[in-house]
Amino acid sequence: MPTAVADRPAFLEVTWHDDHTDAVGYVVIDRLLRGVASGGLRMRKGCTLEEVRGLADAMTKKEAIHLSNELRYVPVGGAKGGIDFDSRSPDAPGVLERFLDSLGPILRTYWAAGEDLGVQQDVLDEIFERRGWGSMITPVRALLPDPEEADRRIAEAFEVVVDGVAQDELVGGLGVAVSALTALECSGRRAAETTAIVQGFGSMGGATARFLAEAGVRVVGIVDADGMVFDAEGLDVDAMLGARDRFGSIDRTQLADRVEQLPGDAWLATECDVLVPAAISGTITDENQGAVLADFVVEAANLPVTASAEASLAERGIRVVPDFVANSGTNAWWWWLLFGDVDGSWRESRALVEQRLGELTREIFTLADQQSTTLRSAAQQLSAERLAVLEDRERTLVS
Ligand SMILES: NC(=O)c1ccc[n+]([C@@H]2O[C@H](COP(=O)([O-])OP(=O)(O)OC[C@H]3O[C@@H](n4cnc5c(N)ncnc54)[C@H](O)[C@@H]3O)[C@@H](O)[C@H]2O)c1
């Protein structure tokens, strides 16, 4: 078995300067595997090269950890793009278009991109269509056993709606819920005797809350951008989903009388077993980690817990299931669909997300317990080992 690859600089980093505004954009291709790297494009004021680098590195880990000999999908490399500009500015569409024009050659050859914070997929698709560039996954098409069949599966999969929610908005949160439930199981806890609080009630938070509740977990708090709704007896998650708008905000006028409304920052200090940050990065920090009462933090958002806060949580025995495992369901599902590991039906999609996220979470618990280390260290080790296998295969192909 090849040894884990030591930390290395990214394969490629590009800094782009807009010639109409002060926008600066970054692309980091952390690794190219089989000639392709995958990762979203975000736009937010204050975005830095360091942030994009960290996210691209996390994408490589999120890809590599899913290596499995039983699947047709073989992981590709990780990438990320970021534009330092206010996505709500009237100039934002022009900035995005000029960025895509400048980076077009990279996007069309080896960066399979998609939406991320502040960038919508339909806007990206429309720009690509207008330019005649095909789809954003063009770089991956050469790797697909049957690209036309993949198109058909994708079209069908994106038509599937489960209880009013499109399945592509469910798979990510389903994966987070499975990770959380497996974490409880690995610690000898019963779902029916546990409580959870979810910060963020959009695609990820909404689906996580839904599948936790379905498994019998009492979801006592949900936080959106307007604050926390709380019920110590357990919220009616279906009713909350019914009162949610497309931005993930809960209509407070539809709340039952017993539901309390609390400030958004009350969530950390509220008693529960599992905390799921599913909104923003950097929400659990050195300053507020001391308030955490839960036993587990399961990361649905990217980088929601800072590294030093995580170290302090670990000292207090609070375990963090890392983002590149817990929230990897959407990314993995997309590839399973493209490569034909699932047929696009909810039955197959749900079954594979449950199987793989359960297996991965169990693996990192076992390794962390064997080595008396954190779940993140264990996951990093597994991911690095699998990346080494992938890179070794790549070298064999080239030589
Ligand atoms: N959607 C995916 O498939 C996916 C996959 C992996 C990771 N993620 C990450 O998960 C996070 C959430 O993604 P999403 O797609 O669910 O977003 P979304 O836009 O659908 O929902 C965001 C939710 O967070 C809430 N929110 C925003 N600011 C908040 C704040 N300061 N405090 C509390 N709540 C706040 C909003 O009210 C909304 O409920 C992001 O960090 C994203 O990068 C998403």
Image (cartoon, grey):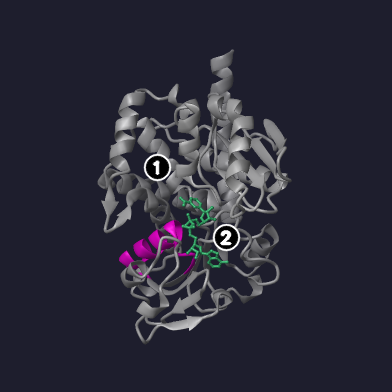
| Start-end of magenta stretch | 198-217
10 Å neighbourhood of mark 1: few (<14), some, or many (≥20)? many
- Between 4 and 367, the residue placed more toward the observer is 4
What kind of element bears circle 2? loop
Is residue 141 among the parts visible in the rendering? yes
Compared with residue 196, is residue 72 higher up or lower down, i.e. above or below?
Answer: above
Q: Which mark is residue 280?
A: 2
Residue 35, image x, y percentages: 55, 24
- Distance Cα–Cα, label 1 vs label 2: 22 Å
Q: Which residue, given by chain and number where applicable, does mark 1 sit on?
A: 333
Residue ID at (28%, 47%)? 160
- Between 161 and 387, the residue placed more toward the observer is 161
Residue ID at (55%, 24%)? 109
Please tell me which of labels 1 and 2 falls first in the chain.
2
- Between 223 and 57, the residue placed more toward the observer is 223
Splitting the image into 4 quarters, where does residue 241 fall?
A: bottom left
Q: Which mark is residue 65?
A: none
Compared with residue 260, is residue 93 higher up or lower down, i.e. above or below?
Answer: above
- Left or right: 285 with respect to 73? right
Kind of residue indicated by mark 2: Ile
What kind of element bears circle 1? helix
Residue 242, image x, y percentages: 32, 68
